[in-house]
Amino acid sequence: MPVRVYIEDTDAGGIVFYANYLKYMERARTECLRDAAIDLDAWHREHRRLFVVRSVTVDYHLPAQFDDQLTVNANTMTIRPASILMEQPIFRGEQLLLSSTVKLACVDADTLAPTAIPNAIREAMTREL
């Protein structure tokens, strides 16, 4: 997913504030699911399921700066019964700026207890592997 760095994304030195990379990654995961024909809002309303971030590991390699054009990836690595592990590197051209993994847990929207990922979502995400 392409992302342009705006002034609002940066600190006083013109470098992307570290937490904004998490926002970019969230957008890329949402677009990845949308590309797999998964409407998370519909799943929430109809099946009372949510995906929540369970853990994030991030290594910052190089800083992004104002007006940079970035590419934010969201690659499915593994799908378990109630979780998905994704790799989310961020690039500026060929330069790796950030490497990360994100574990998403599928939870019941009412109890927030872990629950199985619905088969339709599992199948759509498996096609992405």
Image (tube, rainbow, N blue to C red):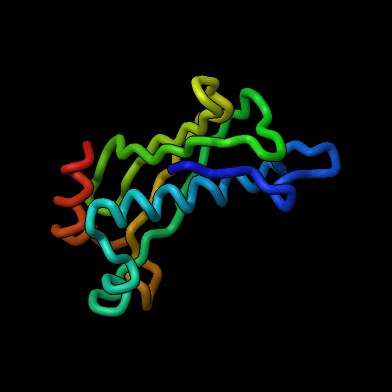
39 lies left or right of 100 = left
At horizontal 62% and vertical 23% (from top left) the residue drawn is: 61
Q: Is residue 17 left or right of residue 117?
A: right
Residue 45 x/y as whole percent: 30, 79
- Quarter of the picture holding the N terminus: top left
Choose top left, top right, bottom left or bottom right for residue 48: bottom left
Residue 127 image position (x, y, % from top left): 16, 43
x, y percent for residue 96:
53, 23
Residue located 54% across and 21% down the image: 95
Instruction: Pinpoint residue 11: horizontal percent, then vertical percent.
Output: 79, 44
> Residue sitting at 57 percent across and 36 percent down?
69
6 relative to 104 in the view: left or right:
right
Instruction: Name the quarter where the C terminus is drawn.
Output: top left
For this orientation, the residue located farthest to the top is 94
Q: Is residue 52 above or below residue 76?
A: below
Of 65 and 102, the residue lying toward us = 65
Quadrant in which residue 73 is drawn: top left
Q: Residue at x 21, y 57 (%)?
A: 121
When the figure is inspected, residue 48 is found, relative to residue 115, above or below; the finding is below
Decide: is 98 above or below 6.
above
- Residue 119 in the figure: left or right of residue 47: left
Furthest residue toward right: 12
Residue sitting nearer the eye, 57 or 33:
33
Q: Is 117 drawn above or below residue 28 in the view shown?
A: below
Q: How many marks?
A: 0
Question: Which of the 4 image quadrants contains residue 106?
Answer: bottom left
